[in-house]
Amino acid sequence: MNGIMTALLTPFNEDGTLNEKGLREVVRYNIDEMKVNGLYVGGSTGEAFLMDESTRKEVLRIVKSEAGSDVTLIAQIGSLNIEEAVRLGNEAKELGFDALSAITPYYYKFSFEEIKSYYQRITEETNHPMIVYSIPVLTGTEITIENYGELLALPNVIGVKYSDTNLSKLTKLKELHPDKVFFGGADDMLLQFAVSGADGAIGSTYSLLGKEANGVFNAVQTSSLQEARDLQNRMNKVISILEDVGVYQSIKHVLKQNGIDGGYMKFPFREISAEEKKEAEKIIDILSSG
Ligand code: HMN
C-alpha cells in the first residue's frame, strides 16, 4: 500500500452512460504503460459524486474484472448518504478491492465528532481497511493533527489520502504515525510530498505521467532524505515551542541558559513570564536529546 497510484478517470458516453470499453482501456493503459502501483477508483477524478449508486458499483465491478490482481485497488466509497457508503464499501470488499477510502462528509459543516462517527460507522459495517480522504480545498473541512490521531486510532483505519498542501503537518503526522500510510494528492507537489514523508501519491495526472511520477518518487526514496526528515522533525518541535512562547524572546532566553547574553527585548516587545521561560527551556532538552 504505497507508491504511485492513479486516481482513475471514468469515461462516459455522450448520453452520460458509462463507457465500459473506455474504462477498461484506461485501466489497462495505467497498468501496462504507466506502470502505476495501484488505482484509486471512484474519487473526485472518477466523477463519483455525480453518479448514482448502481453506476458507481458498475465501475467497481468493471475495474476489478479488468485489473484482476495486477495492482493495488482502492475504492472511494464515500457518500453523504451513510447507507450508500456502507453498501458501496461492502460491494468493493466482496469484489476484492484491497482497501476502501471515504471522503470526509461535505456540504454541511459537520463537527469533528460527527465526522468521526461517519468513519466509525463505515469501518464497523464494512470491516475492511480504510483510507481517510481529506481534500480541504474542495470540502472546506480541515482536520487537525490531534483529530487525525483520533481517526487513525479507529480499527481498520490504515492511513490518509492527504490532498492538502500543508506539508509540515504531513511530516508531523508521519512522525506521529509511522505505521500508517499517507498519500499525497497535489501532483505538482509530488516531489515535496515525497520529501515530506508521504508513502505514495494518488493523482489524476498519473494516467499520463505515471512513469515520471514513479521516477520522482523512487529518486527521493533511494537518497538519504530520511535523515533530513528526522532532523527537520526535531527542528519543528523546537520551532513550535518558539512560536508559542515568542520566537525572539525564547531564543534569547535559551541562549542565556547556554551562557550567551542574548539581552532583553527592545520596547514595545515585552519580556516573557517565568512560566513562559520554563516552557522555552523544554527546547534545551530537545536539543540535548539529539
Ligand atoms: C481523486 O480523488 O480523484 C484524486 O485523488 C484527487 C487528486 O488529488 C487530484 N485533485 C483533484 O482533482 C482536485 C489531483 O491529482 C489533481 O488533479 C492534480 O494535482 C492536478 O491539479
Image: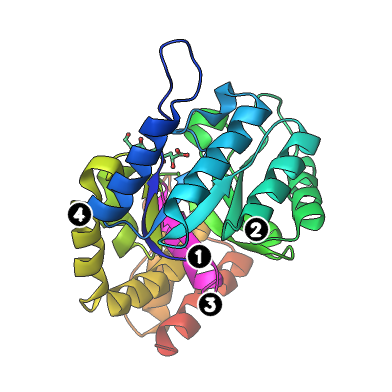
Mark 2 nearby-residue class (10 Å; few <14, some 14–19, many ≥20): few
Most distant residue in the top direction? 15
Disc nearest the viewer among 3 and 2: 2
Q: Amino acid at mark 1?
A: Val
Amino acid at the residue labelled 3: Lys
- Image location (x, y in percent) of residue 250: 44, 65
Mark nearer the viewer, 4 or 3: 4
For marks 2 and 1, the one nearer the N-term is 2
Per the image, the residue denoted by label 2 is 146
**Residue drawn where x is 53% and y is 37% of the image:** 59
Type of residue at label 4? Answer: Lys
Q: Amino acid at mark 2?
A: Glu
**Nearer-the-camera pick, 109 or 272:** 109
Pointer 3 or 1: first along the chain: 1
Q: Quadrant of residue 191?
A: bottom left
Answer whether labels 3 and 1 touch (C-beta < 8 Å): no
- According to the image, label 4 marks what residue? 211
Q: Which residues are magenta?
A: 166-184
- Classify 169 as above or below 177: above
Neighbour tally class for label 4: few under 14, some 14-19, many 20 plus, Cα within 10 Å:
some
The CA distance from mark 1 to mark 4 is: 22 Å
| Circles 1 and 4 in contact, beta carbons < 8 Å | no
SS category of the residue bearing label 3: helix
Q: How would you rate the neighbour count of disc 1 (Cα within 10 Å): few for under 14, some for 14-19, many for 20 or more?
A: many
Which comes before the other along the chain, label 4 or label 3?
Answer: 4
Q: Which mark is residue 181?
A: 1
Quarter of image, ligand 1: top left
